[in-house]
Amino acid sequence: MIAAVIALPALSAALLLSLGNRTNKFGPWMAIAASTSSFLIGFWQFLQMLARPEEERAAKQKETADERKKKLKAIPLTDDQIKAVDDFYEEMRRNRPQRGGGQ
């Protein structure tokens, strides 16, 4: 389902670009529909995530992290290299600017 969030606007943009001026009548409405539907799918998935109990969300995050590590092992990366990748992303998360009006 998450692929639809990216695929809908991408496919509609490809269609609009390939058809050119023939989409002048319906093209803007198609772009709006693709963007809106992509947002609604993402929002629905967000609401479903919030509706899950805390334990289930933690289990899902662990499952996702395990899948990611499995994919990194398939490259193949050593355990030290995987740890370096994890450390890099953790450092990026810590150094990310905070939102809001504060400095």
Image (tube, grey):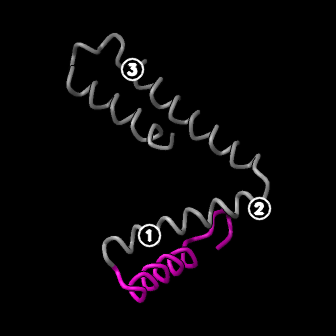
Q: Is residue 76 magenta?
A: no
Which residue in the structure is indicated by mark 2? 55
Give residue 50's position: percent from left, percent from top: 74, 49
Which segment did they paint magenta?
A: 77-103
Is residue 77 found left or right of 61 in the rendered image?
A: left
Name the residue located 77 percent from the left edge and 61 percent from the top edge. 55
Whether the magenta-drawn stretch holds residue 86 is answered as yes
Q: Which mark is residue 28?
A: 3
- Between discs 3 and 2, the one toward the N terminus: 3
| First of labels 3, 1 by sequence position | 3
Image coords of residue 94 (percent x, y):
58, 78
Identity of the residue drawn at 38% across and 75% down: 73
**Which quadrant of the figure contains the C terminus?**
bottom right
Kind of element beneath mark 3:
helix
Q: Is residue 33 left or right of residue 60?
A: left
- Is residue 56 placed above or below 82 in the rendered structure? above
